[in-house]
Amino acid sequence: MKKLLLSIFLLTFINQGFSQSILSKNYKRYSLDLDLGLNSFHGDIKGKAGFTFATKFNWHLTSAFSANASLDFGTINGNDKTRLNSFSNSYVQMMFGGEAYLFNILGFNVLSNKFQPFIGIGFGGLSSNIKKSSISEIVSTEKNSGWAFCWQFTGGAKLKINNSFDINAKLSLNYTKTDFIDNYKPIVAA
C-alpha cells in the first residue's frame, strides 16, 4: 500500500512538473516582502515576547521555487524571576535561502491563484547586541555580543489580494550555533 501511494505521488509530481512547467526557465520575476511580527525566545532564560521587522527580496526562479535574501531587525527579552536572571537584546539577522510553493508543485492552479501555502529553508548569521543583562550566576560581567551562524525553517501561506499585493502569514524557527544570545554562562563542570 505504501509503495502504491508513493508511486501515485511521484507520478503526479512528475506529470504535473513537466505538464505545468514548474521548472520552466522563463518564469523569472522579483518581489519584495515586508514582515512585522512577534518573536518568542527559547533558551536558558525564559523568554518574553519581542518584536521583529524583516524585509526580504525574492527571486522567483519558477512558479514553484524562489531564492531569497532577507534582513531582519528585532528584540529578544527574557526574565527568570526564580533565579533573578534577565536580559534585553537587540539583533540583526541576515539570511539566504529558498521557498517552495506547494500548490504550484502539486498543480492546483485554480487554488494557487488566490491562496498559496509554502515552506522554506535558509541559513545566515545573527548579530546579537546585549543591551542589559542581570545574571546571578555569571562568571564574567562581559556582555556577549557578536555574530553567530543561524538556520531558519519557515512555513506559511500567502493570500493574493491583487497582482501587486499579498498578505502572508508565516512561522519561522531560527536555530543558532551559540548559547550566548541571552548572555547566560552557567557555572557547570566541563
Image (tube, rainbow, N blue to C red):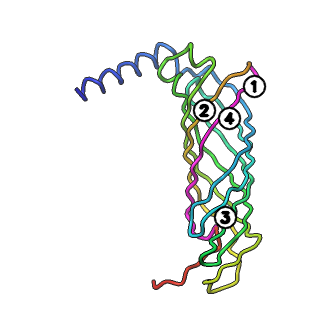
Residues at marks 2 and 4, CA–CA distance in whole angstroms: 6 Å
Q: In terms of secondary structure, where does tag 3 sit?
A: strand
Residue interval drawn in magenta: 163-181
Instruction: Name the front one of labels 2 and 1.
Output: 1
How many other residues sit within 10 Å of disc 2, few (<14), some (14-19) or many (≥20)?
A: some
Q: In terms of secondary structure, where does tag 2 sit?
A: strand
Q: Where is residue 170? Give x, y as percent.
A: 62, 39
When asked about the image quadrant of residue 11, the answer is top left
Q: Earlier in the sequence, mark 3 or mark 2?
A: 2
- Residue, x 74% and y 62% (percent of image)? 90
Q: Earlier in the sequence, mark 1 or mark 3?
A: 3
How many other residues sit within 10 Å of disc 4, few (<14), some (14-19) or many (≥20)?
A: some
How many other residues sit within 10 Å of disc 3, few (<14), some (14-19) or many (≥20)?
A: some
In-image side of 50 versus 178 (left or right): right
| Badge 2 amino acid | Ser
Q: Where is residue 57? Give x, y as percent.
A: 71, 38
Q: Where is residue 56? Give x, y as percent.
A: 71, 40
In-image side of 50 versus 22 (left or right): right
Magenta region includes residue 173: yes
Q: Which residue is mark 4?
A: 58
Q: Which residue is mark 1?
A: 165
The label on residue 150 is none
Q: Which residue is mark 3?
A: 147
Q: In terms of secondary structure, where does tag 1 sit?
A: strand
Q: Which residue is mark 2?
A: 66
Image quadrant holding the N terminus, namely top left
Residues at marks 3 and 2, CA–CA distance in whole angstroms: 26 Å
- Residue, x 36% and y 23% (percent of image)? 9
